[in-house]
Amino acid sequence: MERDLSRMTSPEADEAVRESRTVVLPIGSIEQHGPHLPNGTDTMAAELIARELAKRMDAVYAPFSPYGVTPIHAGHPGTVTLRRETFEALLTDVCSELIAAGADTVVLVNWHEGNIASMNAVATDLQDRHDVVFVAAHACYTAQRIYRDVGGELTHGGGIETLAVLAHDPDCVKVDRAGEPTRPEGAVELDRMRRGSEVYGFVTDVSELAEEGWFGNPTWATPDRAESFVDDVAAEVLTLVQSVIAAHRG
Ligand SMILES: [Zn+2]
């Protein structure tokens, strides 16, 4: 059953939050994704997975801002970035309200790397101050792991992101405008560098990765693969989220 905070009435929301005590928020970004994908790619992907996860957890789906922290794409038409302070204040306020309403578990389903530092700051701060468990799920990385063996790559505007939009709405994908699949020299290495867990560096402008602002192979995404995208990714995210909750609560 879907329990979307924005679609429920006040008494329904009261009952749903008290009963489930778990809320799921999508965290994305509005930013350029090349000539073939919509600016809202990350938000669309986060919302798809978060909605499905909420259903599977019998949790309340709480909409969040479509905007994220994305100075890396600043200056490209279509990009709208929030300042970190704005994003953190917004996330703090929304989560605090949900906690006050009765939530004791907050799951953040994210599809944009630029949000991670701010998400972590807000989650640890609120968990420290309230009797609540926060879980951060970076569904983009889960998708990367799932599709790696069949040639799927998580690059900005590449195969996996195209797949997510295809699953959301095929009319939003314009692969014919992408031209040939691109793979700028060093881009894969830079992605690996910035996504490291032991030692990592930073990319502050997308042009360091790719002059065109995107790279990868959008044609990897097929309608066939898109059909099971939400199921595949949400199932895997669910397993991981449950293991985090179990680590806290046994
Ligand atoms: Zn993206």
Image (tube, helix red, strand yellow):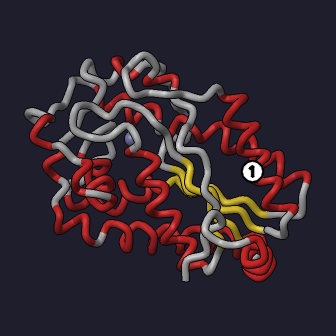
Q: Residue at x 47, y 48 (%)?
A: 111
Picture quadrant where residue 212 is located: top left
Q: Position of residue 26 (x, y in %)?
A: 56, 55
Q: Is residue 250 visible?
A: no
Which quadrant of the render holds ligand 1?
top left
Q: Quadrant of the N terminus?
A: bottom right
Q: Quadrant of the C terminus?
A: bottom right
Q: Position of residue 113 (x, y in %)?
A: 50, 39
Q: Residue at x 83, y 63 (%)?
A: 132
Q: Is residue 38 visible?
A: yes
- Depth check, front residue: 116 or 22: 22
The number of numbered badges drawn on the structure is: 1
Which residue is outermost to the front?
Answer: 9
Q: Is residue 102 left or right of residue 51?
A: right
Q: Is residue 195 left or right of residue 131?
A: left
- Depth check, front residue: 104 or 10: 10
Q: Position of residue 224 (x, y in %)?
A: 17, 68
In the rendered view, tell whether residue 240 sits above or below residue 37.
below
Mark 1 is surrounded, within 10 Å at the Cα level, by few (under 14), some (14 to 19) or many (20 or more) other residues, namely some
Q: Is residue 121 left or right of residue 221?
A: right
Residue that numbered label 1 is attached to: 94
Picture quadrant where residue 15 is located: bottom right
Q: Position of residue 28 (x, y in %)?
A: 51, 45
Q: Secondary structure at mark 1?
A: helix
Q: Amino acid at mark 1?
A: Val
In the rendered view, tell whether residue 61 sits above or below residue 1.
above
Q: Residue at x 77, y 63 (%)?
A: 133
